[in-house]
Amino acid sequence: MTTKLEPAAKIDYSAEVAEWIEAFDEVVAADWEQSAELLTALRQRAREIGVPTPGELTTPYRNTIPKLEEVPYPGDRTLERKVESLIRWNAMAMVHGQNKKDAGIGGHISTYSSLATLLEVGFNHFFHAKYGELPGDFIYFQGHASPGVYARAFLEGRFDDARLKNFRHELRDTPGLSSYPHPWLMSDFWNFPTVSMGIGPLNAIYQARFMKYLENRGLIEASPRKVWAFVGDGETDEVDTLGAISLGAREKLDNLIFVVNCNLQRLDGPVRGNKRIIDELEGMFLGAGWNVIKVIWGSDWDALFERDHTGLLLRRMEECVDGDFQTFKAKDGAYLREHFFGKYPELLELVKDMTDDQLAVLHRGGHDPAKIYNAYKRAIEHKGTPTVILAKTVKGYGLGSAQARNATHSEKKLADDALAQFVQRFDIPIPEQAAKDGAFYRPEPSSPEIAYMLERRKQLGGFLPQRNPPALDFKAPAIDYFKEWTAGSNNRAVSTTMGFISILRHLLKDPTIGKLIVPIVPDEGRTFGLESAIRQVGIYAPEGQKYSPHDADMLLYYREAQDGQILEEGITEAGSMASFTAAGTAYSNYGVPTIPFYMYYSMFGFQRIGDMVWAFADSRGKGFLMGGTAGRTTMLGEGLQHQDGHSHILSSTVPTCISYDPAYVYELAVVLQDGIRRMYQQNEDVFYYVTMYNEDYAMPAMPEGAAEGILKGLYKFRAATGGAAVAQLFGSGPILNEVLRAQEILAEKYGIHTDVWSVPSYTEVRREALSVERWNRLHPAQPERKSYLQTQLEGTVGPIIAASDYMKSMPDMLAPWLNANGVSRLLSLGTDGFGRSDNREHLRRHFEVSAEAIAGATLSKLAREGKVIKPKKAQQALIELGLDPEAPDAAHA
């Protein structure tokens, strides 16, 4: 039985606590890691005997690494400072000069000015381009800091000053520099697009995970390489930035390092004016299981901490919020003395021997190479979890009146006096007029500072960033490889989804390319029929399967394995897209041409993570996006939020995305074969979006000679019989079957004959037509060329009725080329409007894409043109077909 201590006993116990603390201090002095283990053991024991131990998700507002634990800085601080100063100058001059001569061209100065030291310590001591013969580190740069990365490349001799003068001028005679990291625009330089906030951090997490995946599957050799992600503190408000950090700890990604540049400001003002963003982020990352290292105060604060025996200095720091810290840096030393130290007489006494100028330049940790070096060193040595470094900096550091002010993010150029101050502060050896002109400056290659920076990069394996994809020796399977799927289903009803899974399983078994296939699915594997593939190749789990699944006694049990091939991501389309990005760029980043197949509900693709798809295209990614359970009417039952009628409209906006909407498995097989050939054998920088459906029907064999038309996007599937065609019917996906039924209805009930065309890709047909149209426009003196669409339809007569399970704007893409005598031949039917929960029959009637609706639209169009059928008879035919002329428009229902 326990009782409360009497007051006298409490006094005695307090003395005993002091002894415990003294003993603990001795352990800390001997080995801080051992002291952490001791605390863990004590907490564990407390839990075992029922003593509550409240957890702490924030630590005191000071550096994680104490002064006594620091190692000496290994570099030449003087030369490194000169290099950093020159980079600062050239980065600023690049943006300043461009805006001076081309007002409004944009660019950013302040982000790099806060980040410079964080990057330079990395470039000089940590960022490996190679580890011996093995590949080096990946770096996700803060996008707004790109001028600093360009300025470093300029000092390294990788760019000349003409290139810098064309910053944000990419369409001039001299090659320019893109605004931000864009591999599409600078394919030999940037690896990762990062400037759309949140994309870089999210992709970095899954890149680190994919690196482990490749290692565990034996596709690359294990190495000490790291993934570094430089993140803005304001960027952490994006849900993408922090939304996946639990994955890092769960999968023990100790190859991942986040460096959060805590300059306390976003575009319009403080990130957390009334709180401290470092405290907030520390709690989040600690709670998610990350190793957290705070770099808050520079070395010049160490003496103040040592002289403060009361803890009052730390207390004062913890009384201040980020809005205060921003003001302290925007003002001068006298203000800091009065408003920070002046609150307590003891603190004023602490700094009585320091001048106002000395107070004004007290450093934050993110501008102190020694503090940063020790943080980076501890990060790369840490095992078992990812590390985040929270580095406190000043936005606009060194930019005079712009420093730490709300408007600093938008600063594009400096006044003459600010330029002069900059030159003086950072010791830039250029004349006064050159300073005012913002002239670039690069010392001779033999100068000590340039020789030093080049030697450091040589020691670390070469320049970064650089993109240098190796040549691939890849042979795609021939079309005969897919003959099982081009031969039809022998009247057996199957879905295109099941056809795809069958092809995928076959590819996974292939002795040549099977190991390169990367199936990705966001917790919908059973929906897509992946059970057999799960048993075949397993789900990737870095620790293997530590439990016996409940269905272990079944043939198709749920199998996880350390070398598993399927990436089952859980309910995260963004995370799945990040894995698709890592796999789709592995040919460049790892020299391993992995072929990702990302399967997902098509409704939750482009509209949900469209920004990431755009970045994937920017990255020159390859692979297959497989939009499953597609279509507004084919996806029965699920209703408004699930039924997709517009993903092909969205995919058409991405220049490198090749989109197909196959009706039959043979079309799907032809597309997949040619996609593998184009992307990996021909090395084209494209990727594919392919829709697949859950409707079962018999799959016909591929018609002779159809392959070319499938790939070009249009071919005649079934010609009219019993008479000449007076109309052309277009269909794609499962709606092609409705079109075929409409063809029969028109012939049998009304004696009207039509041709039926399969249109697997309106996008590809349109793109080719646009290309031909452009050529004709630019060559008026040459004979006019004909597009593929015009060639195929040459000699056909009558209106064109186009129906799909997508919005009418999809077939409308072809409208400019489908005119006759100044009148449009095209009538588009589609699924504009919100989805509904019902079966396919009612959904297709509602959206007017049923066979009856297609037949009725054909009769109406013919009647309007005064051909074949009279208007009154056409009106009566609509009633006979069960169509209600007064029914509400589904587009607005």
Image (cartoon, rainbow, N blue to C red):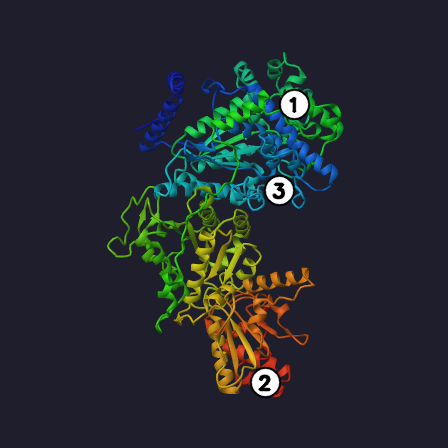
Whole-number angstrom distance, CA of label 3 to CA of label 2: 59 Å
Q: Quadrant of the N terminus?
A: top left
> Horizontally, is 337 left or right of 841 in the view?
right
Q: Is residue 360 above or below residue 712?
A: above
Whole-number angstrom distance, CA of label 1 to CA of label 3: 27 Å
**Nearest the camera: 93 or 544?**
93
**Nearest the camera: 370 or 867?**
867
* Residue tagged 1: 426
Q: Which mark is residue 178?
A: 3
Question: Mark 1, mark 3: which one is toward the viewer?
Answer: 3
Where does the image place residue 686, in percent across and percent down from the top left? 51, 53
Where does the image place residue 505, in percent across and percent down from the top left? 34, 57
Q: Earlier in the sequence, mark 3 or mark 2?
A: 3
Question: Mark 1, mark 2: which one is toward the viewer?
Answer: 1
Q: Residue at x 64, y 19 (%)?
A: 359
Q: Which mark is residue 874?
A: 2
